[in-house]
Image: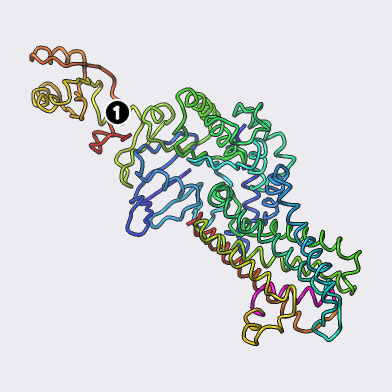
Amino acid sequence: MIVAKGLSKVYGEFRAVDGIDFEVHRGESFGILGPNGAGKSTTMKMIAAVSKRTDGELTILGKDPNLKGPEIRAHLGVVPQKDLLDRELKAWENLYIYGRYFGLSKKFLKPKVEEMLAFAQLEEKRNSKVEEMSGGMQRRLAIARGLINEPEILLLDEPTTGLDPQARHVLWDRLFRLKENGVTTVITTHYMDEAEQLCDRLVVMDKGKIMAEGTPAGLIKDYSSKEVLEVRFGTDRNEATAPQLATIAERIEVLPDRILVYVEDGDAALEKIHALGLRPVTSLVRRSSLEDVFLRLTGRSLVD
Amino acid sequence: MITSIATSMAVRIAEKRAGKFGSGVYSGRAGQLVERNFLAFKSSNWLVVISGFVEPVFYLLAFGLGIGKLIGGVTDGSGHTVSYAQYIVPALLATSAMNGAIYDSTWNVFFKMHFGKIYQAMLATSLGSLDVALGEIGWALLRGLTYSIGFMLVVAPMGLIPSWWGLLAIPGATLIAFGFASVGMGMTSFMKNFHQMDWINFFMLPMFLFSGTFYPISVFPEWIQWIIRALPLNQAVELIRGLTLGNLNLAMAGHALYFVVMIAAGLFFTTKRLTALFMS
């Protein structure tokens, strides 16, 4: 549904997006994972046909956004990072008028607004103004608004940034429902748990480039070991202990506060560490995550 | 709940429009902006709205009936003598059309752009920049028009509109409000902070006082008169005054043309600026 080849966006000297290739297929949930400033939002704006590409090719449903902007935007549902709700209007008015911007009739919108209020679990807030709603409610309203034109592709830019854990889970539940209904979604995020939860397939982006592409499980398999043993020896001793640890694992990462030991069997590795006569202050065995993939690819953490 | 196989209605609407001239910036839905503003307006501060309506009435009472008693008559452009109140009514009408239009197209637009950020959300739909420009300007024009009709309803029964040509002052005021709203939004779309917005007020008050509103500009030296004639409010005052006093002349076509140019320039720059800000 979306095809990008060598897609670039340059602001002056700054290459925000630097020649990326990807494809999004019908019905899938496609993720763009990367830290702040990786070029995720810029990519999203180009897909949303509100930002013109500097170079490369981009087609959305077979159409070029530079030439067919309004048509493509009619196909899309957009949930921007900062919601951009109309703060002078009530909840239901936000949904209604957004539908009107697409040229939809009042007759069509009347039941549609009710359906969307129900989907967003905001029926009781229909007459509330935006500032009277919590952050989670505002985000749900923004998603409902993005769905008002029955889009084929829903674009979500950092959907849960700034929300508390409970609001995040409510939101994820709503997004799962959309997925079950076969809506194609494109999600940008810098949360690896979100990417693992919501995305069928994703690209890892850094500094305007795509570093890797695959399913969450596939990426972990390709770029990390099965398990990770996290050990702490105390801030001043981590560095000194590293050479010894390197002998028992294929790869280790020394972070300021801890050492990550990449192995197939975490518990066995911990025993070997004890056998070496080392006594970590704390230790933790966990499964590899996309965070580890990102660390491997860029040498940096996702959230810093 | 989501149609993925059948084409959605929004897409069909957009496709119908596609390929027509200007479809990249205009979808023919400026009216939706007016509808949005009406929804927001229903719950807004009515006091502000009413103040804009009574302002010219206060000026009329203070100057027209107060000072007018001391002055007696004024000679209008074509040599007739009219009462002072009759002389300043068209100027106040033009001013209220201007003020109504400027209020919505400058400060309100500035807030929507920088704090409400509603244009960004609008332009993510199949609306275009010209829809937003026309819609906002249209709304601002409506306020200017409402003020001038309200003012007419007050002054006409008082016998302050001596000519039947004065009826044309309403479409005249519409043209004036359109021109000011268009240029107002055009300038506002380029402004980045409050400091720059203050320049609008700085410019508006002297223009109101010296544009032939309260006395003929013939009191000024020749070169100042030419500067004043170039200002939009003097153009507006001359146009409306010619109509309410029934002194029609060819110069009025020039005044009208002045506003047509303002409308076109304002729309052009607003559309260009919105496109550059939110769609490039």
Where is residue A151? Give x, y as percent: 57, 40
Where is residue B131? Give x, y as percent: 63, 57
Looking at the picture, does residue B131 appear above or below residue B235? above
In the image, is B81 to the left or to the right of B19? right
In the image, is B55 to the left or to the right of A184? right
**x 67%, y 74%: residue:** B210
Residue identifier under label 1 = A220
Crowding near pointer 1: few (<14 within 10 Å), some, many (20+)?
many
Q: In the image, which residues are magenta? A: B229-245
Q: Is residue B243 magenta?
A: yes
Colour scheme in use: rainbow
Where is residue A194? Give x, y as percent: 41, 29
Where is residue B158? Give x, y as percent: 90, 65
**x 64%, y 83%: residue:** B226
In depth, the one of A98 and B265 nearer the eye is B265
Q: Magenta: predominant secondary structure element? A: helix
Q: Is residue B260 visible?
A: no
Amino acid under disc 1 = Ile
In the image, is A141 to the left or to the right of B64? left
